[in-house]
Image (spheres, helix red, strand yellow):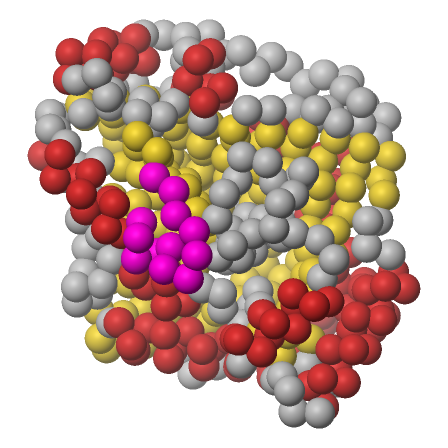
Amino acid sequence: MVWARGPAIRPENVLAQGTEFCEAQRFHLERPIAGESVTAVGVATALEASGPQRFQRLAKALREQQERLVVEGPAQQGGALWVGGFGYAERPRVSRVWQGFPAMRFVLPRLWVLRRGGDCFWGAAAREGMAVARAQLREGLRPCASRAGGDAPAPEPRVDARTSASAYRAGVCAATAAIRAGDLRKVVLARELEVRCASGFDAGRLQRRLAVRHPACAVYRVGRGNRDFVGASPERLVRVAGGTVYADALAGTAARGRTASEDAALARELVLCKKQQEEHALVVDAIREALEACCEEVRAPESPGLLATAGIQHLHTPFEARRGRASALQVAARLHPTPAVAGTPRPAAQAWLRAHEDFERGWYSGALGWLGASGEGALWVALRGAVLNPGGATLHAGNGLVADSDPFAEWAETGLKLQSVLNALLEA
């Protein structure tokens, strides 16, 4: 495996380096506001795991692979960079939407570029050995015209609410009844929406639009074969950098206002809403408990702040902790699934969802990102995304439900979340 400093180029140029790489695996993750991105193509080594011990099995496989690697290049990079993610469920059901997205998959790419501020590092890896990796790196560093092309004329799609309004509202009523009966404290019920389009959608174009619309979010793209999962997540699951662990509690949602005064009024209403406060507090408590089990000196503000993105805002409590010996993957294993995507108590919420959600979540509400050789890494909850396929796209959105949740309001709120991606998808 080879690391080198190289020129900073646009992500679509990296994704265009070598058709054979792109067909095997495509990955992009960026935070525009921070000037950070990871872009990768191809597969030198792929690791997959499923079942109740999937995190532990993948961690063991990563350690074994790292012991075999020979690394050349800038010492500060410290080794391999693995990219990928995992689904919501430890054993997902078979789904036409999520073909090629197993329970957990991370790969050591053939070619990748890591950008942080003004620094740009390129890397290459090859099963065939160091000479092939060096050749791949030289090829990647050559100037390459973007193959993404300009924005094509907008297709004429047809939107189909795969989960009907009546079905979702009935689910909300069933959930609130279970909560009032004491079976649950909170559950996150999701719904599915399909956009049919014979010509399909361009994953690169959607990725670029989301980066412009949501610069504070983590804009992601993971592709295999003829499918790409593309979105802009506001919620960090975990980041491990040096000796510090970062995580986010994000729960409680409101629209943005059309004027500054309207926006401020909606923010005040969100902060003061008892239902939203209850929903958020359950997430905060669970994240604190998970971090205290594997980290030290866990810190968080006493009251939530606001995280505002285009069209939507959330109650937000950021966490920091001293890492100790925990890796990003080990912390993720403690956190996932948080009450922000499943509910609480966790086993009861997951069982309720298996009985009431009539579709496979796949990687929606799982997580994706990168893992480093020394336990560092960054994983974001896979929200506000669309699975693109040759016939269109499939979107998902969910809401946290507590005892006094209103079925009509919850349906409207999931619509607000869907619009953050749907508007970018359908933009002329």
Question: What is the quadrant of residue 397 in the picture?
Answer: bottom right
Q: Which residue is drawn at 71% across and 41% down?
A: 394
Q: Position of residue 15 (x, y in %)?
A: 45, 20
Relative to 98, is 175 on the left or the right? right
Relative to 226, is 167 on the left or the right? right
Relative to 131, is 151 on the left or the right? right
326 in the magenta segment:
no
Quadrant of image for the N terminus: top left
**Whether residue 165 is visible:** yes
Q: Which residue is drawn at 42% across and 74% down?
A: 287
Q: Where is residue 90 in the image (x, y as percent from the top left)?
A: 48, 57
Up-down relation of residue 16 to residue 102 (above or below): above
Up-down relation of residue 262 to residue 183 (above or below): above
Magenta stretch in the rendered image: 47-58
Up-down relation of residue 2 to residue 62 (above or below): above
Q: Residue at x 65, y 43 (%)?
A: 95
Q: Residue at x 58, y 32 (%)?
A: 228
Q: Where is residue 370 in the image (x, y as percent from the top left)?
A: 35, 43
Up-down relation of residue 69 to residue 421 (above or below): above
Name, please, the residue furthest toward the right: 166
